[in-house]
Image: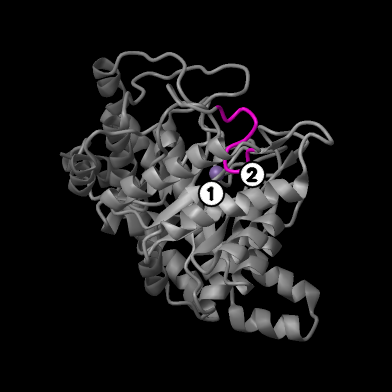
Amino acid sequence: MHAISHDLIAASNAPLLAPLRSDYAYLGEQLARRGIDIDPVKEQLKRFAVALPSWGVGTGGTRFARFPGAGEPRHVFDKLQDCGVVHQLARCTPGISLHLPWDHCSDWTELRGQAQALGLYFDAVNSNTFSDQKDQAHSYKFGSLTHTDAGTRAQAVEHNLRVIEAGRALGSKALTVWIGDGSNFPGQQHFRRAFDRYLESARQIYAALPDDWRMFLEHKICEPAFYSTVIQDWGSSYLAASALGPKAQCLVDLGHHAPNINIELIVARLIAAGKLAGFHFNDSKYGDDDLDAGSVAPYRLFLVFNELVAAAHEGVAGFDPAYMLDQSHNVTDPIESLMSSAAQVQRSYAQALLVDRTALDAAQQANDALVATQLLKKGFETDVTPLLQQARLEQGGAIDLLACYRASGYRTRVAAERPATVGGGGGIV
Ligand SMILES: [Mn+2]
């Protein structure tokens, strides 16, 4: 069932075992001098999971063009297989997040069974009312859940209800709602009325949520609407989530904010308010670039995890964020990007686990700015690679993700089975 043989993973790991043993022991010594026991940290890493977006295994695109790669997944079963490869080697990506109707499937039970056979489960399900589907009665050109026309709003609500139904069959526990609604011109949209219409529509979706589900509201500063968006920022998202009720929370996509905004501060605010749904991890230089997590600003990713680890350490009630990647892979093999991004997210988590919280509390209390910031740097500058590798090894994964994946020949193999594709959805949500 698994796409890569255990023998191949073992052969790839074999020459790396002795160096890893030595590196892990040395890191253990270093951490012991800081009063940290390495093995419990490793066990925490083993429990860490970041979900994969089904759309992330296809090659993304820009607003200008898409350059397909070889062996791209043709349908949701192929996507599942590719996600299975990522998890088989990286061992920290057991969840998959589907996007409907992109991932439409006539038999959810069969799909769920196949996922289980690969050791995977279904994470949050995503609705799509930011593009028109074939044979749909009303267009979303001027909005969906907030459209001025009641029939269009009803159609968008109905789609979300269908997504919840599919999610129930798959065993999902959350619905992620991102809308492209907004305006391109000052005066085009009545801001307050559009937000009221959003609440009216979202309430109908909220009412259909199963008891043990959550509704993740994803905000985005701009795009496709470039003057205003209805759920533009964490403030709008928080207002909506608060109006809807306790099952509604705010999802932070790292690329969906104004440049230079302090995202870790937003994260802290949402934690304090009990409204942090979770994350779509990616990185950016300019806007919603959807680059690989931690590829541009790894310290920012670490600072986000510093807030998360602090919240867990302090036992903040109800703190249970969902982690997911949301990236567009335009110039890499998506499987390679997803594996390395998942490991990067795990790396930031590991670095944050190494911060001396007691010393940090004391430095903050004493207003010792330099010591406080150095305590963070000490976590961030620790090379936790042996910890990540050892955690993967003990779970049957690959010590060197890229080398093992390339040695497997997986992409060449599936390229022979999957005809080249043209077009297809990009990964820019
Ligand atoms: Mn996103």
SS assignment at label 1? strand
Residue closer to the observer: 413 or 1: 1
Q: Position of residue 147 (x, y in %)?
A: 63, 38
Amino acid type, callout 1? His
Q: Could you tell whether 277 is left or right of 87 in the image?
A: right
Name the quarter showing ligand 1: top right
Q: Label 1 neighbourhood size at 10 Å, few (<14), some (14-19), many (20+)? A: many
**What residue is pinned by disc 1?**
280
Name the residue: 51% across, 41% down.
154
Above or below residue 270? Residue 118 is above
Residue 15 makes an appearance in the image: no
Q: Could you tell me which residue is drawn at 58 percent across and 47 percent down?
A: 294
Percent position (x, y) of residue 254?
Answer: 62, 49
Left/right of residue 391 with respect to residue 228 in the rendered view: left
When asked about the image quadrant of residue 2, the answer is top left
Q: Amino acid at mark 2?
A: Gly
For the residues labelled 1 and 2, say whether their Cβ atoms are less than 8 Å apart: yes
Between 138 and 321, the one lying in front of the other is: 138
Q: Secondary structure at mark 2?
A: loop
* Residue at x 72%, y 48% (from the top left corner): 193
Q: Nearer the N terminus, badge 1 or badge 2?
A: 2
| Most foreground residue, 141 or 329 | 141
Q: Residue 148: horizontal and vertical position, in percent?
A: 66, 38
- The outermost residue toward the right is 186
- The residue that label 2 is drawn on is 255
Magenta highlight range:
139-147
Magenta segment's dominant SS is loop
Residue 12, image quadrant: top left
Few, some or many residues within 10 Å of mark 2 (<14, 14–19, 20+)? many
Cβ of disc 1 within 8 Å of ligand 1? yes
Compared with 248, 13 (above or below) is above
